[in-house]
Image (spheres, rainbow, N blue to C red):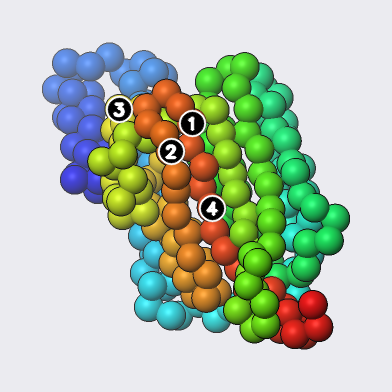
Amino acid sequence: HELRTPLTVIKGTMEGLMDGVLPAESQTYQQVHQEVDRLQRLVADLQELSRVESGAVALNLQPVPVERLVNTVTNRLERLFEDKGVKLATRLPGDLPAVLGDEDRLIQVLVNIVGNALKYTPEGGSVEVSGFTSPSAGQNRTVTLAVKDTGMGIPAEHLPNIFTRFYRVDKSRARASGGSGIGLTIAKSIIEAHGGRIWVESDGEGKGSTFLFTLPVVPQLATSA
């Protein structure tokens, strides 16, 4: 269905142009161009998901300071938040240990989650990125990052399926925003490849959402803490 829809639009528009039913105007060509763009993004995301799920993506695991990770993402997205009139805040304790991860992939995950929070939060709302260390000691110690928004929220019946490919709570709104529907699926695969887990919490429609994921603390820090 996700591939068929843009192809159907492109085919229908081109047939309309050839038959003279649709005017050969820039708006018509722009519609075709937008659908081609969406199709390209979808194919690229499908290729990415296939590589991650098959284990073909080799993670470059290094100590990653959490504050640097979060700041990289918030700096990258800050202008988009300003343009929409949504507040972006961070709340990170100063003693957060570094995590063991592939920094580029973790940036990819956080950009996706924070970007989604912006997408579904109306003007005047807010998004907060926070972090905390798990209470467990030793090698199992983890850092949890949470992205909390004041957006549209998620009904309880949809929560178990949020990370399923192509699953959308609000299909019309997601389509308008141009998402492929598998960004969160890719994020889940990347976090699990790091040995972490990812989940979402929401009190229901209109009450915002919080996406959380865990990452392992760098081993030497875990043992010395």
Disc 4/disc 3 C-alpha distance (Å) = 25 Å
Question: Circle 1 sits on which residue?
Answer: 208
Disc 3/disc 1 C-alpha distance (Å) = 19 Å
Question: Circle 3 sits on which residue?
Answer: 172
Question: Residue at coordinates 62% horizontally, 59% vertically from top-left?
Answer: 144
Disc 2/disc 4 C-alpha distance (Å) = 11 Å
Question: Circle 4 sits on which residue?
Answer: 212
N-terminal of the two: label 2 or label 4?
Answer: 2
Disc 3/disc 2 C-alpha distance (Å) = 21 Å
**Mark 3: which secondary structure?**
helix
State the image quarter where residue 68 is shown. bottom right
Question: Circle 2 sits on which residue?
Answer: 202
Q: Is residue 171 left or right of residue 150?
A: left
N-terminal of the two: label 4 or label 3?
Answer: 3
Figure quadrant of the C terminus? bottom right
Front residue of 134 and 71: 134
Mark 1 crowd level (few <14, some 14–19, many ≥20, 10 Å Cα): many
Above or below: residue 206 compared with residue 196? above
State the image quarter where residue 214 is shown. bottom right
N-terminal of the two: label 3 or label 1?
Answer: 3
Amino acid, disc 4 = Leu
N-terminal of the two: label 1 or label 2?
Answer: 2
Question: Residue at coordinates 57% horizontally, 39% vertically from top-left?
Answer: 148
Marks 1/2 in contact by CB < 8 Å: the verdict is yes
Which-is-in-front pick, marks 3 and 2? 2
Question: Residue at coordinates 29% horizontally, 46% vertically from top-left?
Answer: 167
